[in-house]
Image: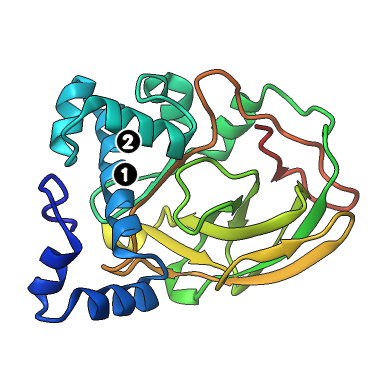
Amino acid sequence: MHERYSEPITLKNLAAEVFVSPFHFSRTFSKITGVTPGRYLTAVRIFEAKRLLLTTSLTISNIVCSVGYSSVGTFTSRFTRSVGMTPTQYRAPEVRDLLVAVSPQFQRMPSLELLQEAGGGLIPAQRAGGSIAGKIQMPAEFGPGNVLLGVFADPIPQRGPVAFTHVAADSWATEAFIGNVPAGRWVVIAIAEHPAATTPEERFSIGATRGPITIKEGEVTGLTVQMRRMRPIDPPLAISLGDANTPVRLSPPAPGIAAGDRLLRC
């Protein structure tokens, strides 16, 4: 999929590559990766489209062809539905500057200073919700990392988080707090950049909850996220903390919580 995403690929084609039935392939693939082959392929194609939109001057028509779609209309509809912005809106500077991307070929993390500047100052939270008290476990061999801990609706998110925080992790277990998380079922994903890394493979690490967690109104939910290196089977991830119309907004920290805690208002 990573090598041939620009081509038409069917479940039958994929299963034939490893000499098993389509049913067996789909079941095994979903068990190992956590998503179906179709959703994984869509994630690869959308990631490449985002990368090309933000790093090249290619027309949308050319990008559509290069990521495996035959119709500009179909691509635009699917992209807009998944990402929450049209391909044209995605090219806005606010999106590019606040992009978080992790893949073997393309990696990016905005600085804490840029997040603070883009937020335009602290504003009162406009919604109630629950909170997350997280612990980020960073193996010593990774070195210190700047970590984005976000709350997402999907295990392969295409949109920004509904709430997030940004912390510096330099020990085995670093604590993080996210306030004003809407009540509901969410996936928590952590992405860390390690500035002292000497190779691209060691520069980023990721971690996530094993499945969705339930956030209840007025309650604090505890969780632990174990960071690890990306694996070849991990889908590429690219989300922006801003959009073409609304800048990132920052909420004031909860009592006793460091000022690094943040809230993305959609």
Crowd band around label 2 with a 10 angstrom C-alpha radius: few (<14), some (14–19), many (20+): many
In the displayed structure, does residue 249 sit left or right of residue 211? right
Q: Is residue 149 above or below residue 123?
A: below
Q: Residue at x 30, y 80 (%)?
A: 28
Q: Quadrant of residue 125?
A: top right
- Residue 127 at x, y percent in the picture: 83, 37
Residue 47's label in the rendered image is 1
For the residue marked with disc 2, what is the amino acid?
Lys
Q: Nearer the viewer, residue 111 or 47?
A: 47
Q: Is residue 41 visible?
A: yes
Figure quadrant of the C terminus: top right
Regarding mark 1 in the picture, which secondary structure is present there? Answer: helix
Task: Return the x and y of residue 88 as percentages of the image width and height.
Answer: 36, 19
* Residue that label 2 marks: 50
Residue at 58%, 64% in the rendered image: 170
* Figure quadrant of residue 199: bottom left
Q: Amino acid at mark 1?
A: Phe
Q: Are the two marked residues, 2 and 1, in contact with CB atoms closer than 8 angstroms? A: yes
x 17%, y 41%: residue: 68
Q: Nearer the viewer, residue 92 or 18?
A: 18
- Residue 140's x, y, as percent? 49, 75
**Does dot 2 land on a helix, a strand or a loop?**
helix
Give left or right: position of 175 versus 168: right
52 horizontally vs 109: left or right: left
Q: Is residue 99 visible?
A: no
Residue at 28 percent of width and 25 percent of height:
73
* Image position, residue 19 (x, y; %): 9, 80
In the displayed structure, would residue 219 be above or below residue 101? below
